[in-house]
Amino acid sequence: MTMLSKRIERLSESETLAMAQKSRELKAKGYDVINLSLGEPDFFTPDYIKEAAKKGIDDNYTFYTPVNGYPDLREAICKKLQRDNNLDFTPDQIVVSTGAKQAIANSVLCLTDPGDEVIVPTPYWVSYRDIVEMAEARPVFVKAGIENDFKITADQLEKSITPKTKLFIFSSPCNPTGSVYSRQELEALAEVFARNPHVYIISDEIYELINFSGKHESIAQFEKIRSRVILVNGVSKGFCMTGWRLGYLAADKEIAKACSKLQGQFTSGAAGISQRAALKAMETDPAETKPMLEKFRQRRDMVLEMLEDIPGMKTNLPHGAFYIFPDISAYLGKSDGENLIAKSKDLCMYILKSVHVAVVPGDAFGDPNCIRISYATSEELLKEAVSRIKKALEHLT
Ligand SMILES: Cc1ncc(COP(=O)(O)O)c(C=O)c1O
């Protein structure tokens, strides 16, 4: 048997990907599977971005790229942060990476030492926990329940900080809950951070453009803590560019320099063609993405209405991203006649096998009472999928 490192043994398989894999297997066997487990928009990358990428190829952006990104892209990111978020950054504070995921991994690896505590509000995006564990730091989970719209309070934050706390990681809009922190809620958290100058904050804003609450708010807007905020964003979700693998961070110069140093030894600079495409996205008026937002809002409303019609299912109103995270605990402990449905994982497997709909167990996000339903697919399929889920749940006793 191969002796793999403890580091890799500790790492869990991404459950979102595992579910997607199982649904592909069923599809290959000829079953009509509806996949609601995916974390990406079902729309194509806009043509104006594709054109910029094609020009990038013709202009020979095909060589190794600067580790922290082309200067004009970093300049454009600063202009975007100024235009949309009223934040002043300079290009030497920006590091362009192979997706927002790498920007997060860079930040965690550059800021934590083994044993440091990292506060992760639960439910969390799956990779936070594993990235923190890879850095040999210790994730400290702070539970935010559906009754508080899956958001932690300033009081909970204050109580979870210890002298060992180094970092806090969260996303708003949030994957998996779709929750969005308001300006006031962020300000209350910022006040706690202001009293705790040993804590850094990773603010994952990858769903910035998929926000139904009107205006995106970043925790980086609070001057008192700005130098300790690592703002992470990218083009994956807002511009339907998940496969282009392009994200970035904006942070204090010293942190940006460290992240660039780390990235230089791992992957080097992000792909040149993707950077040319991202440059176009940064220069685009965010209003261009409104039609997609409207579509997502219609789907959210439709799916929510259908879910509310299922006995025992509890929902909140998600204000962003493209997920609904209903509490299905009323169905745990039931049976499908053969097997006990003990965990949300069992429920998701039962739904997949019995009615061929793939959703993700909440266990993957640190909340075993919930499941994640992605509505990044057509209205027709969503309607069919939710009515199948309803039928499957009716059979449990
Ligand atoms: C909250 C959150 N952060 C980061 C990412 C990763 O983004 P990227 O595809 O740019 O690496 C995702 C993707 O699912 C996400 O949901």
Image (cartoon, rainbow, N blue to C red):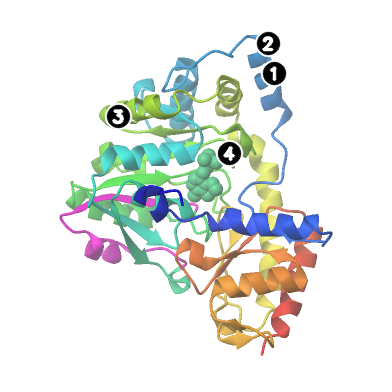
Left or right, 177 with respect to 10, comes to right
Q: Would residue 77 be counted in the magenta stretch?
A: no
- The picture quadrant where one finds residue 94 is top left
The region drawn magenta spans: 149-173
Q: Which mark is residue 236?
A: 4
Other-residue count near label 3 (Cα within 10 Å), few / some / many at <14 / 14–19 / ≥20 = some
143 versus 174 height, above or below: below
Farthest left residue in view? 163
Q: Name the residue tied to disc 1.
A: 54
Q: Earlier in the sequence, mark 3 or mark 1?
A: 1
Q: Earlier in the sequence, mark 3 or mark 4?
A: 4
Looking at this view, is 336 or 367 the one in front? 336
Question: Is tag 3's residue or tag 2's residue first in the polypeptide sequence?
Answer: 2
Q: Are marks 4 and 2 in contact (CB under 8 Å)?
A: no
Q: Residue furthest right?
A: 30
Give the amino acid type for the residue marked by disc 3 in the picture.
Ala
**Residue type at numbered disc 2:** Asp
Disc 3 + disc 4, Cβ < 8 Å:
no
Residue lying furthest top in this view?
59
Cα separation between marks 3 and 2: 33 Å
Mark 3 highlights which residue? 258
x, y percent for residue 39: 61, 51
First in sequence: mark 4 or mark 2? 2
- Some atom of ligand 1 lies within 8 Å of the CB belonging to the residue at label 4: yes
